Amino acid sequence: MVNIVITGTSGQVGSYLMEHLMKKHDVVGLDNRPCPYPQLQENARLVDVYLKKDLSKYLKDVDWVIHCAAQVSVEKSMKDPMFDAENNVLGTLNMLWNSFLHETGHFIYISSAAVFGNPQRVPIDEDHPTIPLSPYGASKLCGEKYVQAFAGGYGLSTVIIRPFNIYSERADPSSPYSGVITKFVGWAKEGKPLLVEGDGKQTRDFIHIDDVIQMIDLVIKKASVSIGRTFNCGTGNASSINELAEIVRNASKKRPEIKHVEPRKGDIKHSCADIALAKEILEYLPQKSLKEGVEKLVI
């Protein structure tokens, strides 16, 4: 059993991760929002990791810090980039500084595929140029650079994970990436049309939360080879929005209509993770197909 601190445990990734790791380890969750999940509340602490400058109370004798806490809305970052930077840049910096000061064992930073921007090649490997298109993408990339600086300058033991389009029952429908699944499922359950933006031929790499948890588990178990690395976290399979709509439609008893509407301005056409490095180093192998994962959400 190891001691683990996870930030952002009221959110999608943090909550599932905490729920999973609590089965075998001593876990404390930190978030600036009250934990909405009863099964996690005993181990959850109401802490703003950006505003709370001294985190010694939570980081004593900690083996792993997993930093999931973030402002995750691209749209909100466009409207209020200062708020985005305070949470995503300064919050990350504060966690890194405290992790160094209090000699935590290892630090995992949950970044985002938004750091890449508009792909110059697909599939996207870890060495792909990073030219983010939003303050959110920029703030997550800035967080990565601070992680690298603390590894190089302070000797902090770090790993960066870049999830692509995560989906789950707890996904935020306002997300322009994985949010499309949540929206489609919600519309299907209500018998409303599935609104596909543009021609629907745009592709994404949708990854179920279970496979994200699998990768983080492997990073911890294989620390001797994972430390110092950056890993793409996806399935390696590109699915079109049209394909996604058909999966949702076929899984729904109400068989909703599929309608095409105006394309979203500036939408990225294609995105898919190259996961060769994670397969080689971590022996990571995604388990859940899009069809299987989405059908469970619809039923």
Image (spheres, rainbow, N blue to C red):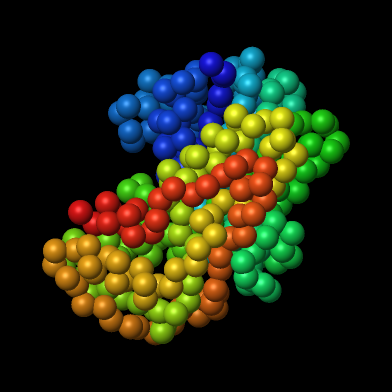
Q: Residue furthest right?
A: 153
Q: Is residue 86 left or right of residue 244?
A: right
Q: Is residue 278 or residue 138 the one in the foreground? A: 278
The picture places residue 26, in percent across and down from the top left corner, at 50, 18
Q: Is residue 289 or residue 169 the one in the foreground? A: 289
The picture places residue 23, in percent across and down from the top left corner, at 42, 23
Residue located 37% across and 50% down the image: 168
Q: Is residue 278 left or right of residue 40?
A: right
Q: Is residue 113 left or right of residue 259?
A: right
Residue located 67% across and 72% down the image: 121
Residue located 22% across and 68% down the image: 250
Residue located 64% across and 64% down the image: 124
Q: Quadrant of the C terminus?
A: bottom left
**Does any portion of residue 83 appear in the rendered image?**
no
Q: Is residue 180 above or below residue 99?
A: below
Q: Residue furthest left?
A: 254
- Quadrant of res 194: bottom left
